[in-house]
């Protein structure tokens, strides 16, 4: 699936998909929508050690 297809199916902007691909933080509701479209569990892709380094922000 292309980023545009994922964004359309998840009802998010394509920029959200691009940010996720680059490893940037996105709002959790949008993150969950993209994960649902891809058929993956959000917990399986969250890097908790990275969140701890950032202080859990964003």
Image (cartoon, grey):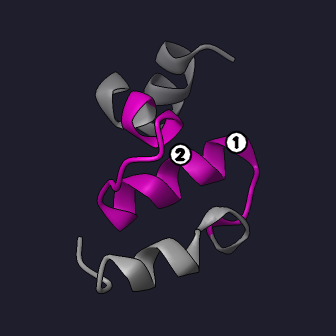
Image position of 13 with respect to 48: above or below = above
Is residue 30 inside the magenta stretch?
yes
Rendering coords of residue 31 (x, y %)? 45, 55
- Residue found 48% across the figure and 72% down from its top: 50
Give neighbour class at mark 1: few <14, some 14-19, many 20+ (Cα, 10 Å). Answer: few
Q: Residue furthest left?
A: 58
Q: Residue furthest front?
A: 53
Q: Residue 56's quadrant in the figure?
A: bottom left
- Residue found 45% across the figure and 28% down from its top: 7
Q: Residue 45's quadrant in the figure?
A: bottom right
Pointer 1: what residue?
38
- Residue found 61% across the figure and 52% down from its top: 35
Q: Residue 5's quadrant in the figure?
A: top right
Rendering coords of residue 38 (x, y %)? 70, 42
Looking at the image, residue 6 sits to the left or right of residue 15; the answer is right
Looking at the image, residue 35 sits to the left or right of residue 52; the answer is right
Q: Verify CB contact (< 8 Å) between mark 2 and mark 1.
A: yes
Tag of residue 52: none
Pointer 2: what residue?
34
Rendering coords of residue 17 (x, y %)? 44, 33
- Residue found 45% across the figure and 24% down from its top: 8
Quadrant assignment for the N terminus: top right
Is residue 29 inside the magenta stretch?
yes
Q: Which residues are magenta?
A: 18-42
Looking at the image, residue 58 sits to the left or right of residue 34; the answer is left
Rendering coords of residue 52 (x, y %)? 42, 85
């Amino acid at each position: 699936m292309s980023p545009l297809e994922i964004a359309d199916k998840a009802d998010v902007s394509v920029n959200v998909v691009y940010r996720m691909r680059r490893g940037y933080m996105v709002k959790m509701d949008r993150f969950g929508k993209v994960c649902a479209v891809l058929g993956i569990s959000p917990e399986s892709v969250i890097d908790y050690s990275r969140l701890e380094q950032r202080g859990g922000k964003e």
